[in-house]
Amino acid sequence: MKSKNLIITAIISLMICQPARAADGFSLIKFANPLDFGNDTPVNTTVDIPKKVTLTHNDVHNQYVIALDRFMQSNVKSSYADFKVLLETMSPSDTAYILISEKLAYIGFFTLSDYAMTKAADKDLTDVMAADIKHYYFPSKKLSPEDEIYLGELYSNINYNAQSREATEELLKNTNLMASSDYANYIAALGYFRSNNLTEAEIYINNAISMNPQNLNYKRLKAEILAQNKQGGEALKIVDFIKSQNLASSEFVRKINSLEMYVNYLTQKNEINKKYYLGYYYYYENEPVKAIRTLQSAITTKKKYNKEVFALLSRVYFDNHDFEKALDMATKANKLDGGNCLALSVLGDLSFKNADYKSALKYYKHAESKDKNGFTNAEKVALTYQKLGDNKKAGELYARILKATSSSYMSYYHIGLFDKNKELSYLKKAVAVNPYFIDGWIDLARCEIERQNFKTARQYLAVANYIDENNFRYYYYQGLLSKHQGNINDAVYNFKKSLILNPDFTPAKEELSI
């Protein structure tokens, strides 16, 4: 991922990649490299970190990489100190704080994770994800930093250093911690799981759950243990329970969907079904190349299997902007099964993209009637009504969706645009649910420009620029910001850049008197 000269970019772009679950006997699933940032820039691992001044962009980048690398090498005490320095010295950014908070909770640095949450100034932007982080990860009993570091060393050795048996044996000697800490029992269960001792793994994960029934990460591990132990029905019941907890943030919804597909993959006996669910797993893990390769290998002469494979391939192709292949796969799926929800939704997306809104509405409505588990197609129906000029019906649909779920960032966004009294609060709700929703950040910036809050507007635009540096609306509002602050040359540059990206964008033309 390309770095930009913004502190927030340095933090967000260095998010830890969650390791894929290890599945014995299937070599395609491997641990992701948390240090793979998609570039070839060498990291200076001997950089001296300033302790009393705000970190520069390069300092932040290096500090994060060093801290994570030290954790993986089981130099956990130094890693903990480095992360603490990072939080104390980085340039303030609520979005960066909450994203790094999730990553710290993932590796068991709960005290630092909570500290990162408290650093966020605007809780409206962070409260949704903060609640999900605590519900998903946090232990019932607060650990001391010393215990977090100790357990972090064991976790590092289990996950990254192939010492699961040794680490587990050491942990079990600490009888006081095992008797008092649900998280210690989770680490023991993880160690046994990585050693393929499923019987002991189940005993200790049950201990952790009995001590902390609210923790969803413990239940996630139990589902994996059961699935690996050929108890697929029980594993899927746990997945259903986790889904029923209604985590609101898009990142945690993705985690749960990914878990569901992984458990289904483990529990299927039919090889075609296994490949289908593995492809779905890769889709939710944002690995489209692996998803496509796996799904293509699942295409068979037995048509009853192909309809689901074609439909999922159509979604993967569409999301990766290969629209010709998306149309081909969706059409094939629709011929085999005219009521396939996923294929219908993709056909609607293709029609919508081509401004054929009447056809899109037909496909979306049909997909919505078949969609028993979500609200995505209902959102698409509402958005298409907007394109057809029926804002009243669209607004009613968005309101109905929000009565059923708090996860619909699109509904928050559009209701905010409809109602000026709710605009700012609902736009914040939208990006709180999905921090990568660029339109939400851009419209938040617009609101702040209108209110003459230029510093806040600049912060929101910085996030938008990270998400997509080629968004024409970003450059337009950056131009407005520069204009309001008297930077005319910068304003003209940004308006021109907006028109290069979208030559038909009238507001930018008007600013340039074109």
Image (tube, rainbow, N blue to C red):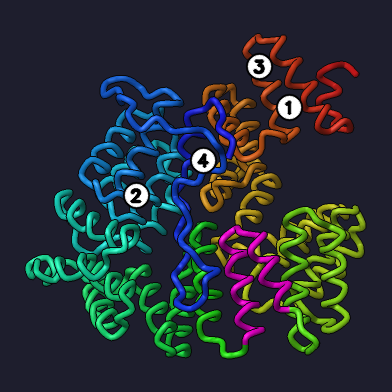
Q: Nearer the viewer, residue 267 or 196?
A: 196
Q: Which residues are magenta?
A: 271-298
Q: Please say if 243 is above or below 48.
A: below
Tag 3's secondary structure? helix
Q: Amino acid at mark 1?
A: Tyr
Task: Give residue 14's position: percent from left, percent from top.
Answer: 47, 41
Taking depth in this image into account, of 417 and 419 the one nearest to the observer is 417
Real-space Cα distance between discs 2 and 4? 15 Å
Between 433 and 19, the one lying in front of the other is 19
Which label sits in the foreground, 2 or 3?
A: 2
User: Which dot, 4 or 3, sits closer to the camera?
Assistant: 4
The verdict on residue 272 being magenta is yes
Residue 170 image point, x, y percent? 14, 66
Q: Residues within 10 Å of mark 4 (few under 14, many from 20)?
A: some
- The circle drawn on residue 13 is 4
Q: Cβ–Cβ below 8 Å for labels 1 and 3? A: no
Residue 166 location, quadrant: bottom left
Q: Main secondary structure of the magenta part?
A: helix
Q: How far is the residue under mark 2 from the one under mark 1?
A: 36 Å
Residue drawn at the location 76% of the way across and 15% of the way down: 492
| Residue bearing the label numbered 1 | 476
Give the residue pinned by disc 3: 482
Q: Earlier in the sequence, mark 2 or mark 1?
A: 2
Percent of width and height locating residue 63: 36, 33
User: Which residue matches tag 2?
Assistant: 104
Comparing marks 2 and 1, which lies closer to the viewer?
A: 2
Residue 228 placement, left or right of 275: left
